[in-house]
Amino acid sequence: MNQEQILQELQFKAVRSSGAGGQHVNKVSTKIELYFDVANSNGLSTQEKERILLKLKNKLSKDQILLMQCDETRSQHRNKELIVKRLFETLENAIKRHKKRLKTKPSRAAIERRLNSKKRSSQKKANRGKPSLEN
């Protein structure tokens, strides 16, 4: 993944943010929308594109364009920095290969400890009953 190449391919759009903020929110476009064309990107290899298209298919449009938005702060520049950082985190998580889980078996001692604790707790609960009057 070539981050410099991807940065050049990004398209940004500033729109008016919703929510609280009074008159300022009605005048200034601080919300940033980021568009990234995954299918036509030169910053990604074909394997990376395939993994991203597979893992992020619910976040992509029909044209394989990833759309992300940020309106966390009142600053347009800060929102732009945040959304670029979030994009790279999302792409890296999509590309990352997870290790396959190896099946393990509990040791004999662990099985013994578990069974002994179960016996102790069942005995403790059995002792909670009313004592019998037969002597």
Image (cartoon, grey):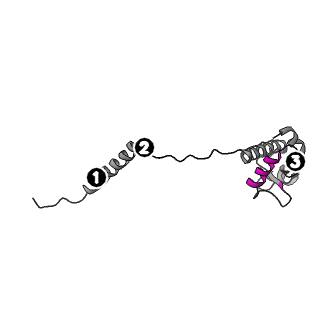
Residue type of the residue flagged with mark 1: Lys
Q: Residues within 10 Å of mark 1 (few under 14, many from 20)?
A: few
Label 1 SS:
helix
C-alpha separation, residue under disc 3 versus residue under disc 2: 50 Å
The structure residue drawn at horizontal position 16% and vertical position 61%, both measured from the top left corner, is: 132
Q: Residues within 10 Å of mark 2 (few under 14, many from 20)?
A: few
Q: Does any portion of residue 42 appear in the rendered image?
A: yes
The structure residue drawn at horizontal position 88% and vertical position 48%, both measured from the top left corner, is: 12
Give the position of the N terminus as an image quadrant.
Answer: top right
- Decide whether residue 18 is among the magenta residues: no
The foreground one among 59 and 26 is 59
Q: How many marks are shown on the rendered structure?
A: 3
C-alpha separation, residue under disc 3 versus residue under disc 1: 65 Å
Instruction: Give the residues in magenta.
Output: 39-65
| Residue with the mark numbered 3 | 41
Q: Earlier in the sequence, mark 3 or mark 2?
A: 3
Q: Earlier in the sequence, mark 3 or mark 1?
A: 3
The structure residue drawn at horizontal position 38% and vertical position 42%, both measured from the top left corner, is: 109
The structure residue drawn at horizontal position 90% and vertical position 42%, both measured from the top left corner, is: 8
Q: Earlier in the sequence, mark 2 or mark 1?
A: 2
Q: Does any portion of residue 73 appear in the rendered image?
A: no
Give the position of the C terminus as an image quadrant.
Answer: bottom left
| Residue with the mark numbered 1 | 124
Task: Give the answer, above or below, for where 83 lies relative to 125.
Answer: above
Q: Residue 55: x, y in percent?
A: 73, 53
Label 2 SS:
loop
Q: Residue 71: x, y in percent?
A: 79, 50
| Residue with the mark numbered 2 | 107
Asked if residue 48 lies left or right of residue 130, the reply is right
